[in-house]
Amino acid sequence: MNPDSLNPSMPANATTEIRLAPARGLALPALIAASGARAGVRFLEFFAAQIRNPHTRRAYARAVGEFLDWCESKGVLSLTAVQPLHVAAWIELQGREVAAPSVKQELAAIRHLFDWLVTGQVVPTNPAASVRGPRHVVRVGKTAVLEPAEARVLLDSIDAMTPAGLRDRALISLMVYSFARIGAAVGMKVEDVFTQNRAAT
């Protein structure tokens, strides 16, 4: 499921297919479609109105879609028939295939979706509310931090006589100074930088 282009103004009776692009459609998960028009609209509103980050939206959509498909394969016929046992069993299965942080994110996706469906009066209770995710404790960070001398060696090794070298040097300098990830660094704008106590922040 790719809900990046979801259209929240969908008619209430269009529960089986949502137009995302001129030549592309998206079928709702069977359990959502089987639960009526209100469930279909509420499902779409969750992704369109509640989740602003496109990466989170994609991850949540994938997790929710896989969970609902799994429930259908186990004989669950409607959203109201989903029980905490179903959520717990699926989380247990996921824990055998993916890392604990991913499982926790998938559980969060299911929990938040059902919270949204409860407040929309689509289902009476949230079956994921009582399910606990796997424990995950990070004691040592995975990302190495450069020492000042190491950063200087790295920056000095970049050829600043070419446009590509200047670009790389500026980008790596920004990342080292701000501890920003590459995605955040390339998305920065001039107005994101301001001066505080004579230092750029």
Image (cartoon, rainbow, N blue to C red):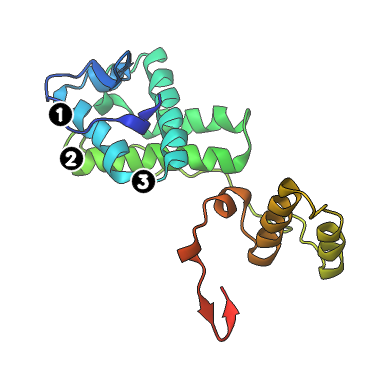
- The one nearer the camera, 168 or 98, is 168
Identified at 40% across, 24% down, the residue is: 1
Foreground of the two, 200 or 16: 200
Earlier-in-chain disc, 2 versus 3: 3
Q: Which residue matches tag 3?
A: 52
Judged by depth in the image, the label closer to the viewer, 3 or 1, is 3
Residue reaching furthest bottom? 197
> Which of the 4 quarters of the picture holds residue 77?
top left
Q: Earlier in the sequence, mark 2 or mark 1?
A: 1
Spatial CA distance of label 2 from label 1 is: 9 Å
Residue 100 seen from this side: yes
Residue shown at the point (32%, 13%) measured from the top left: 23
The label on residue 120 is 2
Q: What kind of residue is marked 2?
A: Gly
Q: Residue 146 appears at what percent x and percent y?
A: 80, 62
State left or right for residue 57 relative to residue 182. left
Query: Are the residues tagged 3 and 1 within 8 Å (C-beta)?
Result: no
Q: Is residue 125 visible?
A: no
Disc 2 is placed on an element classified as loop
Name the residue type under label 3.
Arg
Q: Is residue 39 above or below residue 23?
A: below
Position of 163 relative to 180 (above/below)? above
Marker disc for residue 2 = none
In this view, 146 is above or below 24: below
Secondary structure beneath disc 3?
loop
Assign a secondary structure to mark 1.
helix
Q: Earlier in the sequence, mark 3 or mark 1?
A: 1
Q: Tell me if label 2 and label 1 are in contact, CB under 8 Å.
A: yes
Q: CA distance from mark 3 to mark 1?
A: 22 Å
Residue 198's spot in the image, x, y percent? 58, 85
